[in-house]
Image (spheres, rainbow, N blue to C red):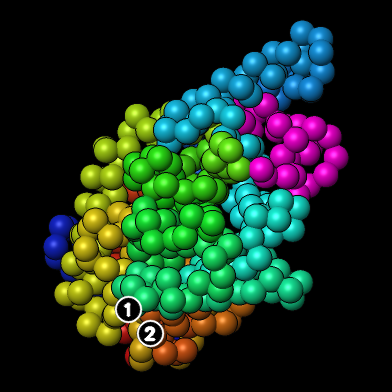
Amino acid sequence: MKVLILGVFPHNSIVLHSIDAVNKLSTFLYSMIYFDNSATTKIDEEIFDAMLPWLTENFGNPSSAYSLGRQSRVAIEEAREEIAHSMNAHPAEIIFTSGGTESNNTILKSACIESGLTDSLLISAIEHHAVSHPAEWLATQGFRLQTAPVDNMGKVVEHWPELLPSQRSLISFMHANNEIGIIQDIAAIKEQLPATSYIHTDAVQSYGKIPIDVARLMVDFMSISAHKIHGPKGIGAMFIRKGIDFKSHQHGGGQERNRRAGTESPALIVGFQHAVRKAMKEMDQRHVHMRALHVHMRSLISVHIPQARINTTDVHSDCLPSILNVSFSNIQDGESILQLMDMANIAVSNGSACVSGSQQPSHVLQGIGLSDTEAKAAVRFSFCKDNTIHEVEQAVSALKSIIDSMS
């Protein structure tokens, strides 16, 4: 197969090189270019260092009464306070979990079953499977489920209140979508809800990247995670508004105010705390940087890859700066694009890492009106604070040569 590779090129210029085999791509690129930060981010060294003492000398169980355990408990409560402060919440409203999936499952299932807060659910058509799958399971248990469509940008349609299954519904609309980056106006949605309904938002992708104030969002429940903001995997949290009679979905010990059984990990929680601290301190700087990467990549793709359709809105206030989703109607095998990019030492994905390799079209892209073919042949670039303009240019170079070779 004849493949055209774009070499390292100066700002806004392109140099084409012809080679005979795809596996020679790596000779042009000496280290992995990582553009899959919506799947996970690299843990920062100082965050890792902050965790280490809680894996070695400070190893006590935080539920133990002696000093070694009390040290762990103090560290956890200090982390809880700092994370709560980052979103204008009360520390008692933060419950640690293993991550976004557990938080989403716990909130939906407890609200319906253990806590009896609701008899029905309304979710959007572009929810992460960690919301849509438990919602679908709850429908098999007798709870009514409705799905709100979205427009071609990914915004929930204006007539969504007509779809409420009952006056006692739990609405779960994600704050920012993990595939196309669209941000929902959660506060405006909450204002249209009856007083007897509740709202949950999956903020795993948005937390730490854009400002979040739970009082302004008016959410009852929220899910967040550490590993999207350079913290460790395996730790996240639920926000549960004070005053809600929320009962544990996971039974065992009385940890986390009897709302989530299981021994807490001080190391992971401290890592989460430090990731949040750094994200809050650097938020404006990171936002400007990632927006510059986003805008530059969008411009290069628009100019040099005419076959591309950009699926992420260019309205800055409606979209995370960290995500750019592109699809190709003339490509039948979308998985090959990812494989060839990987051979070029560039890590990208076609959407959620949880369904990577499934060969199924993205339900998010289908939700905004793309055909099955386009929804399969998509590439999601997701940026972080460590990516560079030079990496953007290399990635677009490789993508152009791959698309040209497949067309």
Judge whether residue 269 is colored magenta: yes
Instruction: Identify the amino acid type marked 2.
Output: Gly
Q: Which residues are magenta?
A: 245-270
Q: Which mark is residue 369?
A: 2
- Viewer-side residue, 357 vs 108: 108
Disc 1: which residue: 152
| Number of other residues with Cα within 10 Å of mark 1, as a class: few under 14, some 14 to 19, many 20 or more | some
Secondary structure mostly taken by the magenta-highlighted segment of the chain: loop
Q: Is residue 50 left or right of residue 54?
A: left
Label 2's element? Answer: loop
Label 1's element? Answer: loop
Q: Quadrant of residue 401?
A: bottom left
Q: Position of residue 69 (x, y in %)?
A: 77, 16
Q: Is residue 272 above or below residue 293?
A: above
Q: Position of residue 273 (x, y in %)?
A: 53, 29
Q: Is residue 37 above or below residue 248?
A: below
Q: Residue furthest left?
A: 12
- Viewer-side residue, 102 vs 114: 114
Q: Quadrant of the N terminus?
A: bottom left
Q: Which mark is residue 142?
A: none
Instruction: Identify the amino acid type marked 1.
Output: Asn
Identified at 46% across, 42% down, the residue is 229
Identified at 42% across, 33% down, the residue is 88
